[in-house]
Image (cartoon, grey):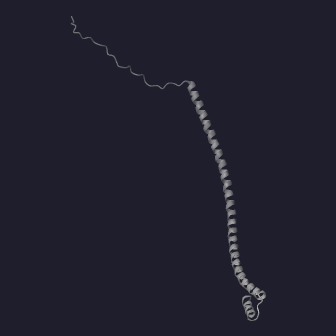
Amino acid sequence: MIQHTGYRPTPVVLPYAPAPPYSPPIAPRRARRATAIVLGVIAAALLITAGVFAGLFTLASGDRDTLAGQLDERRTELGGVTDQVVATEEARDTAAERNTGLETTRSELSACVDVVQRYLWDGLVGAERQAALDQLFTLCQ
């Protein structure tokens, strides 16, 4: 006979069941097709954007060449204008020198005219007339 001591065996319970090995879920055909369509639309948008930027770059390059040509023309014109400015400044300096000479001549002639007027219109007689005549010959040579 077996005596009962109060011990009862308990069954072993695992805290969790072992997981089956990982296998990625198989995407349904619809999901794959939608992904392909989205990627195709994105690729088309990128190609269109690249084409637009290539066109803009080509236009800008042509504009740059045109502007460079215009700049060269303006530089040539500016060179001609600079030459004209130099020539005008030389002509101005020449005219200023001539004006200075004319002012000197005018002041000399003005003194001569004053003496002639005095000789002719003041009614000088005798020694005053002779002094005025001597002064006339001196100033009006």
Q: Quadrant of residue 88?
A: bottom right
| 78 up-or-down from 111: above or below | above
Front position in the image: 90 or 106: 106
Front position in the image: 59 or 140: 140
User: Residue at point 64% right, 45% down?
Assistant: 54
Residue 86, x across and y down, in percent: 67, 70
Question: Where does the N terminus fall, quadrant-wise?
Answer: top left
| 110 up-or-down from 90: above or below | below
Q: Quadrant of residue 132?
A: bottom right
Residue 127, x across and y down, in percent: 74, 95
User: Residue at point 75% right, 92% down?
Assistant: 129
Front position in the image: 71 or 88: 88
Q: Quadrant of residue 99?
A: bottom right
Question: Where does the C terminus fall, quadrant-wise?
Answer: bottom right
Q: Is residue 25 left or right of residue 58?
A: left
- Quick one: which residue is furthest to the top in this view? 1
Residue 139, x across and y down, in percent: 72, 88
Q: Give the number of marks.
A: 0
User: Residue at point 55% right, 24% down?
Assistant: 28
- Quick one: which residue is furthest to the bottom in this view? 126
User: Residue at point 65% right, 49% down?
Assistant: 60
| 96 up-or-down from 12: above or below | below
| 127 up-or-down from 38: above or below | below
Front position in the image: 21 or 85: 85
Residue 62, x across and y down, in percent: 67, 51
